[in-house]
Amino acid sequence: MPVYKIADLKVGFEPKYNLLSERSEKYRCDGEPDFNIGYTDNLMEHQLDLYKGISEAEVEYLWMGTAFNVKLLEYNGMFLHSSTVVVDGKAYSFSAPCGTGKSTHTSLWLKLLGDKAFILNDDKAAYRLIDGKYYAYGTPFSGKHDINVNTSAELCGICFIEQAAENSIERMDIDSAVPLLISQTLRPSNVKRTLMLCDFIDELIKNIPVYKLKCNMNIDAAELSYETMKKERLF
């Protein structure tokens, strides 16, 4: 079985279709897996019934991403539906419901900062707590545009985006941040894993600043979020 190193975890899975195989190839590694993931024919049929109009290749890709993120909870981790940009070795995630403009906003960071910045993952960055620090990782599970880099960076800020005519940004309190984080990650049906998720988020928001950005799609919005989040990191 092929093995892939994703978020510093060795994961065994056997792609059947080219979509998953090609997107995972740059994560390929040697060695024994920390865990394996997969699916049965019955599960594939069930998923096809749930997601009408998409192919078996797309179902495989989506399911493997879900299975990986379920296991990630057991390794001090979670994923966030977000576009995550890295600047000077530090990661900043922008999250929002689909169609709000998170990818457009991070593209403005690239325009503003040039070669200093790159997109780590444009859809589902993985987070892990390792030796007291939070890291964001690129993963092969990166949405329809497949924008990801097989590397990691220290996580320094999370920002939820709302569209607005005028730009403003503010630090969120814990009570406001928790529901948004939960809404943009996997909500396990298993009670044990749900508790793992809650514990991880509880510690995450004590250590990583979370913001609400109301913004238009001009480069001024990127400059505001960058300067604010960078300044917080320096203290």
Image: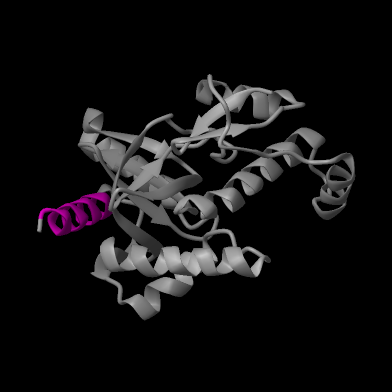
In the image, residue 108 sits, relative to residue 145, either above or below, namely: below
Q: Quadrant of the C terminus?
A: bottom left
Q: Which sits in the foreground, 231 or 127?
A: 127
Residue 165 in percent (x, y) is at 34, 65
Q: Is 2 left, or right, of 109 in this rendering?
A: right
Q: On the rendered image, what quadrant is the N terminus found in?
A: top right
Most frequent secondary structure within the magenta stretch: helix
Residue farthest along the left direction in this orientation: 235
Image x and y of residue 55, in percent = 80, 37
Specify the quadrant of the image occupied by residue 212: bottom left
Between residues 97 and 173, which one lies in front from this camera angle? Answer: 173
Q: Is residue 167 visible?
A: no
Magenta run includes residue 163 = no
Q: Residue furthest bottom?
A: 175
Toward the viewer: 123 or 154?
154
Rendered residue at 78%/41% (across/down): 39
Q: In the rendering, at what x and y percent does residue 149 appear?
A: 42, 30
Tell me where the magenta segment starts and ends, as one range: 220-234
In which quarter of the view is residue 60 placed? top right
Residue appearing at x 46%, y 41% in the figure? 122
